């Protein structure tokens, strides 16, 4: 009986370790009803993809180490990923069908 418990604990530990090794974590600040709109080319998205929902857009940003900001457009189901946004002052415009998300500094695991 004791050998069976040890085996099950060892198996459980291996499964948990395998699952947690690939989990990435990040905290994002969400701004519903706003989208990035820049007058210059320094803040164009480095990637635009079609996604099913906002969670997939967040994951797309998380999977890119250089992603600092993402905008999900609910009307077109597109996700814009940005790497270099010098300042949000004057870069945000109201758009009720968009959600802009900013990666909070120091929350990316593993650090990018």
Image (spheres, rainbow, N blue to C red):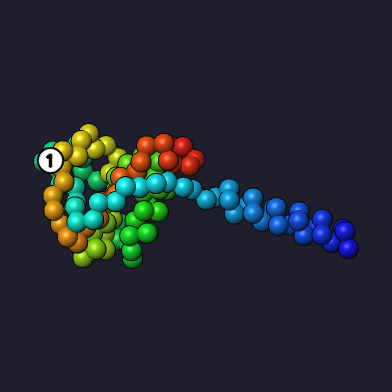
Picture coordinates of residue 89 (x, y %)?
Answer: 16, 38
Q: Which residue is mark 1?
A: 90
The 10 Å Cα crowd at callout 1, few under 14, some 14 to 19, many 20 or more, is few
Picture coordinates of residue 84 (x, y %)?
Answer: 27, 37
Q: Residue at x 19, y 51 (%)?
A: 35
**Residue extending furthest toward the top:** 86
Element marked by disc 1: loop
Q: Across the whole image, how many numbered discs are drawn on residues? A: 1
Q: Residue at x 49, y 48 (%)?
A: 24
Picture coordinates of residue 69 (x, y %)?
Answer: 29, 45
Which quadrant of the view contains residue 85?
Answer: top left
Which quadrant of the view contains residue 75?
Answer: bottom left
- Considering only vertical position in the picture, is 6 above or below 27? below
Can the viewer see residue 98 in this picture?
yes
Q: Quadrant of the C terminus?
A: top left
Which quadrant of the view contains residue 73?
Answer: bottom left
Q: Quadrant of the N terminus?
A: bottom right
Can the viewer see residue 41 in this picture?
no
Q: Is residue 40 left or right of residue 29?
A: left
Q: Residue at x 32, y 41 (%)?
A: 68
Q: Is residue 22 left or right of residue 3?
A: left
Q: Residue 18 or 100: which is nearer the viewer?
A: 100
Picture coordinates of residue 39 (x, y %)?
Answer: 11, 41
Q: Residue at x 64, y 50 (%)?
A: 17
Q: Is residue 68 left or right of residue 44?
A: right
Q: Is residue 105 left or right of residue 110?
A: left
């Amino acid at each position: 009986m004791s050998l069976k418990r040890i085996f099950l604990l060892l198996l459980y530990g291996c499964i948990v370790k395998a699952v947690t090794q690939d989990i990435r974590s990040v905290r994002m600040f969400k701004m519903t009803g706003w989208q990035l709109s820049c007058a210059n080319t320094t803040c164009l998205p480095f990637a635009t993809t079609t996604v099913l929902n906002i969670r997939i857009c967040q994951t797309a940003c998380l999977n890119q180490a250089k992603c600092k900001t993402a905008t999900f457009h609910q009307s077109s189901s597109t996700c814009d990923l940005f790497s270099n946004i010098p300042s949000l002052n004057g870069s945000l415009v109201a758009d009720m069908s968009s959600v802009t998300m900013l990666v909070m500094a120091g929350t990316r695991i593993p650090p990018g």
